[in-house]
Amino acid sequence: MVKDYYQLTKPGIIYGNLVTAAAGFLLATKGHIHFWPLLSVLVGMSLVIGSACVINNYIDRGIDAKMARTKQRALVSGRIPAFTAISYGAVLGLVGFGVLALYTNWLTVGLGLLAYLVYIVLYGIGKRVSVHGTIVGSIAGALPPVAGYTAVVNHLDTGALLLFLILVFWQMPHFYAIAMYRYDDYKAAGLPVLPVKRGMKTTKIHILTYIAAFTITGVLFTVYGYTRIVFLVTVALLGLSWFYKGAKGFGVQDAKKWARGMFFYSLIVTLSLSIMLAVGALLP
């Protein structure tokens, strides 16, 4: 039962967002760790993200019942009652926003609330009706690093904008790769993801376009003085290698297998990016 409640928060999403949030925080502090402020941000955000995921699980239980990978989730199977899940999500959210309000600033709280509403409401609707729902979802996923950044500086600037853009541009190839190798699940659920509605080739073109945008945005961190040359070279190499792997997708016969490889490589990219953002100001 404890495991069911843990899984209801989608821990993989929480951990991924905390990595990028910590990167945003450390970019703002120029790599210097302020332990308690950082801990407060991470604890508050993990609870807020967990709350959003619990509510999302409740909203999506009908869709989850149609997909092989999700039909055994606790809300679908009835192991956790719907009212209990909603109450659990509400408590997580209240405590999480309380932590952010007490130990960060109102701008960071506002960004957290914006991400929460975009994920639950706009993405919840968008992914059911449009191929562009993925873009809406990427907005919610790009706000945690910005919140980590504003928890330090308490204002929006070019650094915050670049963080937002690079995470949007990273998420799109990441999400499209998932949609490609989980094609059958999304089709069975009736979700209008890009591979289902417009085909694999079109999706591959979109993947390359967003990888190019990701690479250009990464370079701009150094152009605008937030990081140094080692960061620029590293992110450029990451982007180019990712683009190369993406371009090879046009010659493969098994698009789903290729997409799965692209998915895992995107995880390497975001982890490497987060590390470089965290220490980029300290490197030569």
Image: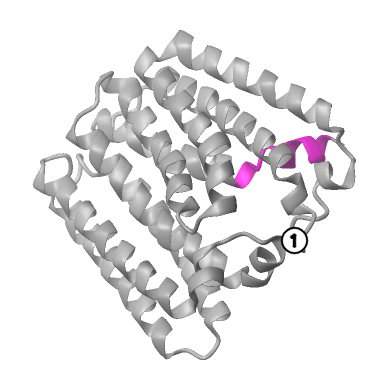
Location of residue 156 (image quadrant) = top left
**Front one among 32 and 137:** 137
Instruction: Give the residue furthest to the front.
Output: 129
Does residue 27 appear to the left or right of 112 in the view shown?
left
Neighbor class of circle 1 (other Cα within 10 Å; few <14, some 14-19, many 20+) is: some
Q: Circle 1 sits on which residue?
A: 67
Dot 1: what SS?
loop
**Front one among 174 and 116:** 116
Q: x, y (%) of residue 169?
A: 34, 54
Q: x, y (%) of residue 133?
A: 49, 51
Q: Is residue 134 above or below residue 78?
A: below
Does residue 104 appear to the left or right of 254 in the view shown?
left
Is residue 6 within the magenta segment?
A: yes
Residue located at (78% from left, 30% from top): 85
Location of residue 86 (image quadrant) = top right
Q: Is there any visible trace of residue 282 in the rendered image?
A: yes
Q: x, y (%) of residue 240?
A: 26, 70
Q: x, y (%) of residue 72?
A: 83, 53
Q: Is residue 93 above or below residue 168?
A: above
Q: In this picture, which residue range is highlighted in magenta?
A: 2-12
